[in-house]
Image (cartoon, helix red, strand yellow):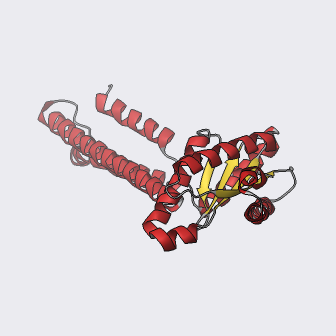
Amino acid sequence: MKWPLGRKLGEALRTFRRSSRDEGQRTSTLALLGGVLLLALLPWLGAWWGAGTLPMAGREFVASSIASAIAIGFGLWVLRLLRNERRLVREHMANLEALTLTDPLTGLGNRRSLERDLTKAVTRSRRLDIPLTLLFLDVDDLKLVNDRFGHAAGDATLRVVGQVVRSSSREAVDAGYRVGGDEFVVILVADRPGAEVVARRMLGAFIERSPHATTFSVGVVEWDGRASTSELLNESDRLMYRNKHMARRAPAHLREEEELE
């Protein structure tokens, strides 16, 4: 005899096996299904225990079938509720993780996100033999902006940096991060000449949009295939500070070019 509810229960079980990734969740759900099946069989087991045979016709058959159908339907309803609850929990956890990896002021990734993504980027660069370059940006004289115009002006300046970094980066290819008060890092899938073009574009866009004519200094380092992620960060940071000091000593019309050397 073919049971439509039985087929639906089998389909639900197969769907669950395909979608479930957590062994603990799978075990608990299988235990629930087992309990539902046992509950569905109780009317038939009771009749067999009392009469020595299963009811195959008459009122007992109808009553046992209705009781089994109710038990299976209830079990499937509970299972669906559990799956929806787990889906909501997964979405909530994903949102929480995104918050822990995002800088709330600029919307860029934070230092924790950079450490995770830079390791992946280096691994991908080595495996696929593609170039990888790091830009280390530091806003010039942000403290003076804060002191003169207030911290709201400083925050507005940092938000402009975030906007410039996002608009100058290729989605799903490059990535930007705020790693300190006025320090930013950009991971670019590009060689050094290409990264310098992007850096100049960022600097020009920032100068145009900066609310208080602020600039930033840049350190550009292409990964050589051997340096660790920390060495790569330290080298780009060192070059950025070198360029910042050189720019302060250089004439105004030469500063932009020297910042990218």
In the picture as drawn, the residue positioned furthest to the bottom comes out as 147
| Residue 53 against residue 120 in the figure, above or below | above
| In front of the other: 187 or 148 | 148
Apparent side of residue 37 relative to residue 91 in the rendered image (left or right) = left
User: In the image, 51: left or right of 200?
Assistant: left
- Using the image, determine if residue 139 lies above or below residue 203: below
Report the quarter where the N terminus lies: top left
Asked whether residue 61 appears in the rendered view, the answer is: yes
* 135 on left or right of 165: right
Q: Residue at x 26, y 39 (%)?
A: 53
Q: Quadrant of residue 80?
A: top left
Q: How many marks?
A: 0
Residue toward you, 91 or 240: 240
Q: Quadrant of residue 96?
A: bottom left
List x then y, in percent, for residue 28: 42, 55
Residue 104 % position (x, y): 47, 60
Residue 62: x %, y % from top left: 16, 34
Look at 64% across and 57% down and name the residue there.
216
Residue 102: tell me if it is visible: no
Find the residue positioned furthest to the top.
Answer: 1
Q: Nearer the viewer, residue 145 or 161?
A: 145
Residue at x-position 54% and y-position 59%? 101
Q: Left or right? Give the position of 136 relative to 178.
A: right
Return the residue found at the far left: 59
Residue depicted at x 23% and y 38%: 69
Image location of residue 205, percent across then percent down: 58, 45
Q: Nearer the viewer, residue 178 or 98?
A: 178
